[in-house]
Image: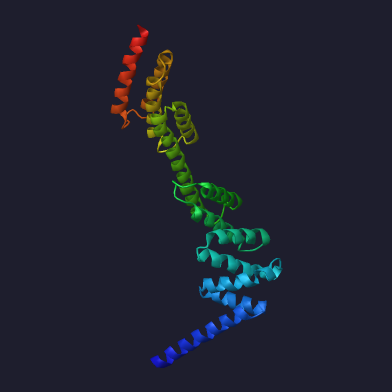
């Protein structure tokens, strides 16, 4: 009995392989489409894609091609070919506005860009694009079953943008210590705090701003030190007002004591 089952299984596989090879060499686009759809339905996405790529130009613009292009797009998505899948799914949405698969295709298209978003330390062009695409989906389908997933994606993408922005501002602070470019560092930190008021990095950013302001004053010409120490003191007060128990308080207090000592000299 087991031998019979094994024989039938092997025979089925050979027939299937033979049909696929025949479809690859065939000029019959309808036959190619039939075999491609079969391959999609049994999760043989690579084979399906190869056939879809051969016949897509012939079916482009035809009203009966909706199912074929949906399968083609999803084959790319399930094969993790996200650049191509994102493009094909977007094209599907615009080509078949009345399709019952339009909402699903729109979400997966946006998700492709989300999956292409790199680590925060790398260039965030794809992250920005993904956020735009996902937000557009949420705006167009506010009652979608995919809305919870879309909101999670948006949250993660925004956190990545935020982390990238903070690391850039932090880098300005580091560079300022070596190149004495304090104005650029203060501006970068101010912009970050303003752009991300609820950020979990706000405490550190505010301390870095105070530290930068202190060093700016310390390394200024004598005529400008008093005003810049006063500005640094404001930065300290803002930090303490925001977080009285800040983990940077001990270090900040030492810098403040130095500021107070310097200001006493200017008041004489």
Point out residue 2 in the picture as x, y percentages from the top left corner: 39, 91
Query: Quadrant where the C terminus lies?
Result: top left
Does 16 appear above or below 50? Answer: below
Task: Measuring from the top left, give residue 147's x and y in whole percent.
Answer: 52, 53
Q: Residue furthest top?
A: 268
**Residue 233 visible to the viewer:** no
Which residue in the rendered view is the most extreme toward the front? 179
Residue 18 image offset from top left, x and y in percent: 55, 84
Q: Residue at x 28, y 27 (%)?
A: 250
Q: Nearer the viewer, residue 90 or 174?
A: 174
Tell me the quadrant of the picture where the N terminus can be found. Answer: bottom left
Identify the residue at horizontal 39%, vertical 33% (top origin): 174
Q: How is the image coloured?
A: rainbow
Q: Is residue 170 visible?
A: yes
| Residue sitting nearer the eye, 9 or 170 | 170
Q: Position of residue 207 (x, y in %)?
A: 37, 30
**Quadrant in the picture for residue 95:** bottom right
Q: Residue at x 58, y 65 (%)?
A: 73
Q: How many numbered marks, from 0 up?
A: 0
Q: To which quarter of the image does residue 91 belong?
A: bottom right
Q: Nearer the viewer, residue 212 or 99?
A: 212
- Up/down of 156 relative to 257, above or below: below
> 7 above or below 62?
below
- Please indicate whether residue 252 sits to the left or right of residue 133 in the image: left
> For this view, does 218 lie left or right of residue 152?
left
**Seen in the image, is 111 located left or right of residue 260?**
right
Query: Which residue is at the front of the view, 155 or 123?
Result: 123
Q: Is residue 214 left or right of residue 154?
A: left
């Amino acid at each position: 009995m087991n031998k019979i089952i094994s024989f039938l299984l092997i025979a089925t596989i050979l027939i299937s392989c033979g049909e696929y090879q025949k479809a690859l060499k065939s000029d019959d686009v309808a036959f190619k489409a039939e075999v491609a759809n079969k391959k999609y339905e049994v999760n043989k996405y690579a084979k399906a894609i190869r056939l879809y790529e051969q016949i897509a130009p012939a079916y482009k613009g035809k009203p009966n091609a909706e199912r074929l292009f949906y399968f083609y797009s999803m084959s790319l998505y399930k094969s993790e070919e996200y650049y191509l899948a994102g493009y094909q799914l977007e094209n599907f949405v615009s080509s078949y506005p009345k399709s019952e698969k339009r909402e699903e295709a729109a979400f997966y298209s946006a998700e492709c860009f989300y999956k292409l978003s790199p680590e925060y330390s790398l260039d965030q062009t794809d992250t920005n694009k993904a956020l735009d695409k996902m937000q557009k989906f949420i705006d167009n389908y506010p009652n979608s079953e995919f809305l919870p997933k879309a909101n999670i994606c948006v949250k993660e993408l925004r956190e990545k943008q935020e982390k990238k922005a903070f690391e850039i501002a932090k880098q300005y602070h580091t560079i300022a210590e070596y190149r004495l470019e304090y104005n650029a560092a203060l501006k970068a930190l101010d912009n970050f705090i303003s752009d991300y008021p609820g950020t979990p990095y706000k405490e550190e950013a505010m301390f870095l701003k105070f530290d930068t302001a202190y060093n700016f004053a310390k390394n200024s010409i004598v005529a400008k030190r008093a005003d810049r120490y006063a500005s640094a003191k404001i930065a300290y007060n803002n930090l303490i007002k925001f977080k009285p128990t800040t983990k940077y308080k001990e270090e900040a207090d030492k810098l403040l004591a130095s500021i107070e000592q310097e200001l006493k000299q200017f008041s004489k």
